[in-house]
Image (tube, rainbow, N blue to C red):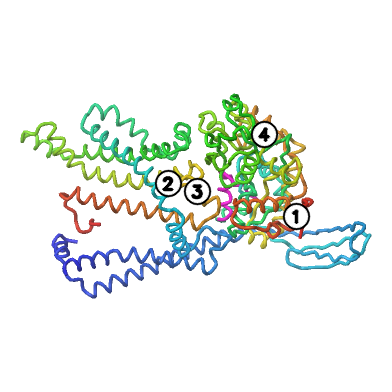
Amino acid sequence: MSSDASKDVARGVKVSRRKFLGVSTAAAVGGIVAGVIVGAVGGYLAGQSAAPAKTVTATETRTVTTTLAPGAPTTITQTVTSTLTQTRTATVTQPVTTTVTQTAPEARLPKIRIGSVAYTGMVPTQIAYKEGFLKAQGLDAEVVMFASGAAALEGLLGGAVECVDGASYGSWFMSLAKDIPLVAAWTGLVTETSERPDQQVLIRRDHYDAGIRRIADLRGRESEFTIGYVVGTIREITLKFLFEDAGVNWGKVKKVNLRLAETAAAFAGKKIDLAATMPPFSKEAEIKGVGVPIANDHLYLWDKLFKVDFATSNQLLFRKDFVDSYPEAVRRVMRAYMQAFRWMIKNPDGVRRIWKETTGLSDEILSKIPIPPVEEAYPLYQLQVVADLSYEHGIIGKKISLESYAFPDMPRMRPPPQIQPP
Amino acid sequence: MRAKSIYLHNVIRKLPSAAILIAFLGFWEWLAHVGFISQQLWSFLVPPSVIVARLFTLFIEGGMIFHISATLYRGLIGFLIGVSVGVVLGLMSGWFRALDEIVMPIFEFFRPLPALALFPLLLLLFGFGDLTKIVAVALQCFFATLIPTFYGVKSVDKLLVDSARILGARRRELFFDVILRAATPHICNGIRISIGVAMIVVTAAEMLIYIVGQYGLGSLISWTEVSRDYPTMLSSIVVVMLLGFFLVWIWLRVENRILFWVRETAAERV
């Protein structure tokens, strides 16, 4: 625009109606065109993330055997459902063993991207992938590494991955409480026991040397201490119970969000007094002499609730729409993981090799981490108890029912006395 | 009448961008209503209507004012420190050749390093409190202001400097009345960029390094992300955007006053 025209504008030349209409029309058309372009691109991207990149067909024959125990009802109707909702019923009477054989039609298997994190507990994902167990199940699988379980969950919700290994049940509960339907599938339990603790609370070495050897020793001094942990995980639940049962006011303890890999450095720099962490970072802090384990918060909770010497925190999480569309794929992933767990038991050196590749930590640290045991059944009913407690204590904002969001084809552990299975 | 026409003209100039923004928001709302954005896939893309409703709730009941205040406090202190040191050092480096030759190569070497990459180190040095965030903001604002200031001084027309000398200007008068004035547009540009940088860094710092329960927009975004409270998370992001926009808008008004003597074309006027 020339300087004369500028001056005319500055003097307040009247804007013509034609100019007004022209510019308004151009703006409206521009907005509509932009909206159509953005919509087309968005629709394309939505289609890409929802659609399977590749379809593989397979035929499965599944045999279901039911043995009726003495005293069981004389007549039982068992329904077997295939992937395409074909059903066949069988009526059996006790005491017999009956076999129902069903051949499922060809199953569509999409590409599976599994989100994982570099913690030692997530090594089955690496084993299932690197040792070919996923491929042997006919799956076109890929492992995508994330910085944390929370980031992996974001990837699941954004369609970057179809499955997440590394998000704790705390994250699962929080998602369900916000009406985000994620389905848990079992892989084989990464059990922690008192002999093989996983989730631990460590205290800084100088505090330990000064006499703080238990959580209860913090009583009356809560506000002096800072604990670092990954916020928004099951630690929200387990630490609250651990501290409050020890008579320590959990609300007064300063809490900071701490990435697990920073545990040792944060201790060394005296930025935190306590850390709720897990292997290999807990072991790293211990070996470097900066932290000392004083409690196992997760084991504590399970012992308190169920009088058992084990706890579990992990499962595979899938979006519900994926499970509804590809249940056979979920079954095969579960089978591959179970094979990976059995391989772990037989190949401890192989496990440590994969740990080293995944975490980059030294042999000295990794050699001190015991190989976890395997459990065939999923503790659904136990987790329901924990979920109910989490709601009662305000950790999640809504009462949730896990049965609807647990993959059906999973053996369950015996329910605790507090809960009756549906 | 004249003022009304100027106002109407300015409104018309902003119509295309407003139309595009409205079309985008309308498309987003439509995606949610037709089910593209479901509770499963992309559930974090809460529709704009829900975001607006949540914003009202957060302001009235949710303590959003405290979060804004906390973020502004950390960002403002870091900004003031970083900009002050950056401007002073930039002027000195541009004015004194010795300082230029010794110091500027070092600063140019470190300039590309983002403060966010230093977070783990800053965390270990300064801990989880406000100091870490303020230092991170100050560092980034320092570089964002130092470089434009330095080059502002260096780019002063030599003719102006020579003319002033010939007219008998002393060194002090030369610096304040010629160099500083000529470099002021560059300095103001650097400060404007630093405002945006400060908002980005303070929000990111609060997201990565926070004490549970502490106020701050970044902390709020981080906590609502892990607790899957996506309406609050997106509302907080909108507040960050609006805050940054508002701060830049204020600065532009201040800049217009400072630089009243700079002639601008109508096409450049905000």
Counting residues from the start of the chain, the first of labels 1 and 4 encountered is: 4
Is A147 magenta? The answer is yes
Distance (Cα) linking label 1 and label 4: 41 Å
Q: CA distance from mark 3 to mark 2?
A: 10 Å
Q: Which residue is mark 3?
A: B222
Labels 2 and 4 positioned on one and the same chain: no
Q: Secondary structure at mark 1?
A: loop
- Identify the residue under disc 1: A419
Mark 4–mark 3 distance (CA, rounded to whole Å): 34 Å
Residue located beneath label 4 in the image: A353
Q: Residue at x 21, y 39 (%)?
A: B155
Looking at the rendered structure, the secondary structure element under dot 3 is helix
Question: Which is more N-terminal, label 2 or label 3?
Answer: 2
Evaluate whether label 1 is on the same chain as label 3. Answer: no
Q: Which quarter of the rendering shows the N terminus of chain B? A: bottom left
Task: From the viewer's perspective, tell me whether residue A24 is left or right of residue A292.
Answer: left
Q: Residues within 10 Å of mark 2 (few under 14, many from 20)?
A: many
Residue A363 horizontal/vertical position (percent): 65, 28
Which one is nearer the viewer's eye here, B185 or A34?
B185
Provide residue B254's location: percent of width, then percent of height. 23, 50
Relative vertical location of residue A294 with respect to residue A190 in this rendering, above or below: above
Question: Mark 4, residues whose alpha carbon is within 10 Å: few (<14), some, or many (≥20)?
Answer: few
Chain part drawn in magenta: A141-157
Q: Quadrant of residue A326?
A: bottom right
Report the side of B77 relative to A406 (left or right).
left
Residue B55 placement (x, y as % from top left): 44, 59
The kind of residue on which mark 4 rests is Arg
Is residue B63 inside the magenta stretch?
Answer: no
What distance separates the C-alpha of mark 2 from that of mark 1? 44 Å
Q: Toward which corner of the image does residue A54 lie, by quadrant?
A: bottom right
Is A97 situated left or right of A176 in this image?
right
Badge 2 is on which residue? B203
